[in-house]
Image (spheres, rainbow, N blue to C red):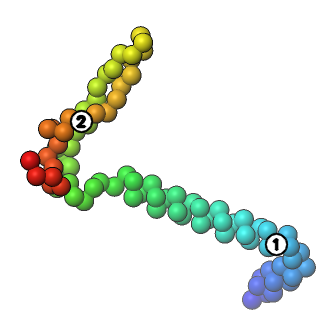
Amino acid sequence: MTQFKIFFRQLYKSGLHAFYKLTGITLGLAVAFLSVVYVAGELGHDPQVSDTGQVFRLNRIVNTSGEEEEMAMTHGRLVKSTHWSE
């Protein structure tokens, strides 16, 4: 109980400085939490894909002006679509 009294006494004495410290800690924790939630969501799999072991990425190597560039491209006929009727 005395620790809380000391904390609030110091908070009252140093006012603005303590406010800056608390605001910084709060914002830092909030950004860290939101970053973890975002990354966890991005690393998760798409729930619409039932067989995730059969999902592949096709790359095409394009040679333009002497430089090789790798691009991820998929031809429309290779994609099984549920949105368009063929």
Badge 1 is on which residue?
Answer: 18
For the point 46% across and 62% down, the residue is 37
Q: How far from the left and from the top, in percent, is residue 50?
A: 17, 55
Report whether 46 appears left or right of 24.
left
Mark with earlier residue (1, 2): 1
The reply to whether residue 10 is visible in this rendering is no
Q: What element carries label 1?
A: helix
Front of the two marks 1 and 2: 2
Q: Which residue lies furthest to the left in this view?
A: 86
Up/down of 69 relative to 52, above or below: above
Separation (CA) of disc 1 from disc 2: 55 Å
Name the one closer to the observer, 55 or 14.
55
For the point 54% across and 64% down, the residue is 33
Near mark 2 (Cα within 10 A), the count class, few <14, some 14-19 or many ≥20, is few
The reply to whether residue 54 is visible in this rendering is yes
Q: What element carries label 2?
A: loop
Q: Which amino acid does label 2 sit on?
A: Thr
Q: How far from the left and from the top, in percent, is residue 22?
A: 74, 71
Name the one closer to the observer, 56 or 18.
56
Q: How far from the left and from the top, in percent, is residue 3?
A: 77, 82
Report whether 9 appears left or right of 24.
right
Q: Which amino acid does label 1 sit on?
A: Ala
Up/down of 30 relative to 72, above or below: below
Badge 2 is on which residue?
Answer: 74
